[in-house]
């Protein structure tokens, strides 16, 4: 989901400098605006991935296996962080990251309803399960 996330890497030293353990796999910095029209190049979150893990995922089949799982984790984190924003949303902006998420969690012909997403966000295990299903995590593990 390139319109949602700015993916960057960190080395052991960079993780430690920011107060994380050196072998942290990933972290997400949510900046807000889940229901805003995106600015050019604007992302609602910066995703930091350990440089070694990123390189391994980019250069091997491991990436195809881990990317759906990582995407599910990142999206669930962003939705959890945006819960206060979501409470006040009644209309979804057509080109917003929220609209993209609703499309991705819905069927081919019909996006997930906003109220259904709000209910899922209140039940993190079910939200993660829905994301894992829609992003074909199990299929990627085969």
Image (cartoon, rainbow, N blue to C red):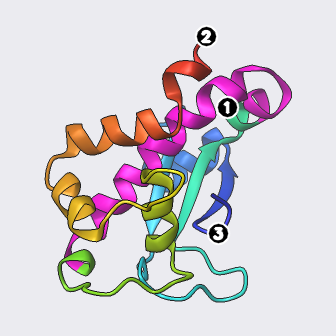
| Horizontal side, residue 5 vs residue 8: left or right | left
**Residue visible at 53% across and 44% down in the picture:** 71
Q: Marks 1/3: CA distance?
A: 22 Å
Q: Nearer the viewer, residue 127 or 21?
A: 127
Q: Which of the marked residues, 2 or 3, is nearer the chain's N terminus?
A: 3
Residue beneath disc 1? 53
Q: Which of the marked residues, 1 or 3, is nearer the chain's N terminus?
A: 3
Q: Of all residues shown, which one is farthest toward the right?
A: 59
| Horizontal side, residue 125 vs residue 38: left or right | left
**Residue visible at 50% across and 20% down in the picture:** 138
Q: Would you say residue 87 sits in the magenta stretch?
A: no
Q: Of all residues shown, which one is farthest toward the front?
A: 109
How dense is the environment of label 3, judged by Cα within 10 Å: few (below 14), some, or many (20 and up)?
some
Tag 1 near tag 3, CB within 8 Å: no
State whether residue 140 appears in this view. Answer: yes
Say which element carries label 3.
loop
Magenta-tinted stretch = 55-84
Q: Quadrant of residue 6?
A: bottom right
| Horizontal side, residue 23 vs residue 64: left or right | left
Residue beneath disc 2? 142
Residue beneath disc 3? 3
Task: Tell me residue 76's x, y (percent).
Answer: 36, 50
**Residue visible at 85% across and 28% down in the picture:** 59
Q: Of all residues shown, which one is farthest toward the top?
A: 142
Say which element carries label 1.
helix
Q: Nearer the viewer, residue 107 or 71?
A: 107
Q: Quadrant of the N terminus?
A: bottom right
């Amino acid at each position: 989901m390139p319109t949602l996330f700015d993916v960057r890497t960190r080395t052991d030293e960079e993780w430690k400098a920011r107060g994380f353990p050196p072998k942290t796999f990933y972290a997400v910095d949510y900046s807000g605006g889940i229901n805003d029209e995106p600015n050019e190049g604007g992302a609602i979150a910066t995703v930091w991935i350990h440089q070694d893990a990123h390189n391994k995922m980019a250069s091997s089949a491991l990436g195809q296996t881990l990317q759906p799982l990582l995407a599910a984790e990142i999206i669930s984190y962003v939705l959890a962080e945006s819960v206060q924003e979501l409470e006040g949303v009644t209309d979804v902006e057509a080109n917003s990251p929220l609209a993209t998420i609703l499309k991705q969690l819905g069927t081919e012909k019909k996006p997930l309803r906003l109220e259904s997403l709000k209910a899922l966000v209140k039940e993190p295990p079910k939200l993660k399960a829905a994301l894992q299903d829609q992003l074909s995590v199990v299929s990627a593990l085969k």
